[in-house]
Image (cartoon, rainbow, N blue to C red):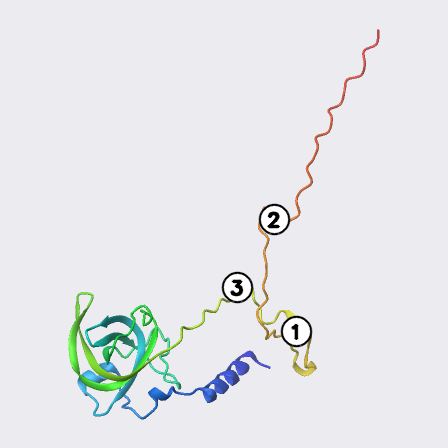
Amino acid sequence: MNKLLLIAMVSVLLGACATVPKSLQGKYAQTTPRDALAVPPAGPVRWGGEIIKVEPAADSTCFEILSRPLDVSARPMRSKDSSGGRFIACHAGFFEPELYARGRDLTVVGQITGSEVGKVGAFDYTYPRVAATSIHLWPKRPVYVADPWYDPWMMGPGWRGSWGWGWGWGPYWGAPPVIIHHRPGHRDMPRATPQVPSRPPQPPPLRH
């Protein structure tokens, strides 16, 4: 089975199983924070992205968020070259900044109430301001570490085309193998046998 085809099938299955959290469900204006500055939508918006800063106040907490496109489950997608701009979302109550930390994924639902001007470095930046009625903090993303020596066509158990499953050469769809490289001086390496220097040759005895 072609690897790209397998990846596509897995993506379709995951998309079919994706569900939007109940607090984020509904129909919302299809606009970005940048577009909303020019033409504010009449209805509520559902925006998400990466938290940049959290500022608790006396009775509410405001989040500065770098907007990202949302996937089918309403989670921000980590596309580093795509953003709809920044926005400010404020929700009643206290939200722990150490939990809602910089870089976490957050999706909010609410109504645009206007805009405010802030600073991004030395640049004056205009943010749409959202009165959030619901916010959803997403779990941290898992970290995947790829083995640089992993070859999907290496020897191992996996799909063998018309031969079915077995052992041999072919695409190895299990977990990448762990390869341990011994370093010089590693305790698991066989130790060299100490060499005893040989006795130097003795001169022949003198005859009288």
Q: Nearer the viewer, residue 41 or 132?
A: 132
Which residue type does callout 1 highlight?
A: Pro
Q: Quadrant of the C terminus?
A: top right
| Residue at position x 61%, y 75% in the image | 171
Whether the residues at callouts 3 and 1 have beta carbons within 8 Å, the answer is: no
Q: Earlier in the sequence, mark 2 or mark 1?
A: 1
Q: Badge 1 is on which residue?
A: 157
Residue 205, percent from left and from top: 81, 14
Depicted 182 relative to depicted 171: above or below? above
Q: CA distance from mark 2 to mark 1?
A: 31 Å
Q: Badge 3 is on which residue?
A: 148
Which residue type does callout 3 highlight?
A: Pro
| Residue at position x 39%, y 85% in the image | 73
Q: CA distance from mark 2 to mark 3?
A: 24 Å
Residue furthest toward the top? Answer: 208
> Pointer 2: residues within 10 angstroms few (<14), some, or many (20+)?
few
Q: State which quadrant residue 155 falls in.
A: bottom right
Whether the residues at callouts 2 and 3 have beta carbons within 8 Å, the answer is: no
Element carrying mark 1: strand
Residue 124, percent from left and from top: 16, 71
Q: Badge 2 is on which residue?
A: 187
Depicted 81 relative to depicted 39: above or below? above
